[in-house]
């Protein structure tokens, strides 16, 4: 078990930001990787029910684990992140939001999870690095680079990790670039996680897809449902559906 730092003071290179109407407070690096809309989309898409045990692979600042814990008050959420400073900030954010009893953040490599965790989670969510190492120059010491590029594992590694920790019938929900669709589906099948739901994410009607949301079931049968597209914007504002996601409301 990793020690949790509960110091609330911000360091000079940190900011305190809010999400979900100001009720969720998140400590972030001022110039490092900062959260976007992606965790909100994935938390709203993932099939999670109250009382379940959820793992966030590559949790970064712990945003998804905290969002799910707030949305499902009987859930317990575990986040795994390889970057120690991200972990320390996430642990302080968990304490700041008084979620220590239901959210744990551990510093660990998702590719090297312990056997004690195998088959113990009902749900896994994952917002992995989107870009291959060959897609741009970056450094292992750059926090943003590690979050965006597959320097410490690619989509196949994260799918394989999910396959190990999921119980039979459990689900993996992932967000990724639309252009990586074939890679994502192949990685899930390679981990014995059968893709069951797919939703493409577009900026506006008429635009090509930018992102994908996919959910697979461990040991499931081949039967993929392609859901209606998700549009982020309506004019210059977020669409009504995305606004509902920020309020943690179910679609009408």
Image (tube, rainbow, N blue to C red):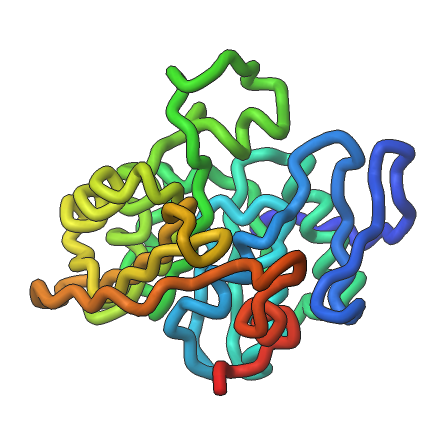
Which residue is more in the foreground, 174 or 201? 201
Query: Which residue is drawn at the image coordinates 26% and 52% (left, top)?
Result: 164
Residue 33: percent from left, percent from top: 65, 36
Query: Which residue is drawn at the image coordinates 37% and 46% (left, top)?
Result: 208
Query: Which residue is drawn at the image coordinates 54% and 34% (left, top)?
Result: 147
Residue 201: percent from left, percent from top: 41, 55
Which residue is more in the foreground, 205 or 145? 205
Q: Which image quadrant is residue 48 in?
A: bottom left
Q: Is residue 29 left or right of residue 202?
A: right
Residue 234: percent from left, percent from top: 57, 63
Q: In the rendered image of this protein, does residue 106 appear above or below residue 223?
A: above
Q: Which image quadrant is residue 157 in?
A: top left
Residue 171: percent from left, percent from top: 29, 65
Spot the residue most to the left.
Answer: 222
Which residue is more in the foreground, 230 or 161? 230
Residue 103, can we see it? Answer: no
Q: In the rendered image of this protein, does residue 83 appear above or below residue 128?
A: above
């Amino acid at each position: 078990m990793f020690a949790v730092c509960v110091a609330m003071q911000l360091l000079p290179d940190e900011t305190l930001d809010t999400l979900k109407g100001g009720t969720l407070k998140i400590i972030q690096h001022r110039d490092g990787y900062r959260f976007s809309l992606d965790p909100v989309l994935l938390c709203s898409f993932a099939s999670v029910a109250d009382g379940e045990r959820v793992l966030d692979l590559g949790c970064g600042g712990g945003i998804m684990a905290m969002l799910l814990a707030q949305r499902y008050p009987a859930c317990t959420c575990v986040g795994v992140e390889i970057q120690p400073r991200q972990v320390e900030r996430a642990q302080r954010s968990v304490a700041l939001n008084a979620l220590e009893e239901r959210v744990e953040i551990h510093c660990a490599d998702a590719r090297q999870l312990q056997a004690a965790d195998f088959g113990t989670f009902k749900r896994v969510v994952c917002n992995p690095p989107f870009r291959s190492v060959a897609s741009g120059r970056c450094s292992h010491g750059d926090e943003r680079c590690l979050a965006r590029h597959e320097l410490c594992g690619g989509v196949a590694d994260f799918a394989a990790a999910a396959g190990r920790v999921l119980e039979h019938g459990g689900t993996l929900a992932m967000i990724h670039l639309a252009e990586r669709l074939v890679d994502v589906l192949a990685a899930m099948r390679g981990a014995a996680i059968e893709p069951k739901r797919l939703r493409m994410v577009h900026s506006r009607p008429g635009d090509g897809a930018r992102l994908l949301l996919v959910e697979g079931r461990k040991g499931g049968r081949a039967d993929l449902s392609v859901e209606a597209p998700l549009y982020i914007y309506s004019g210059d504002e977020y669409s009504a559906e995305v606004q509902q996601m920020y309020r943690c409301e179910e679609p009408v």
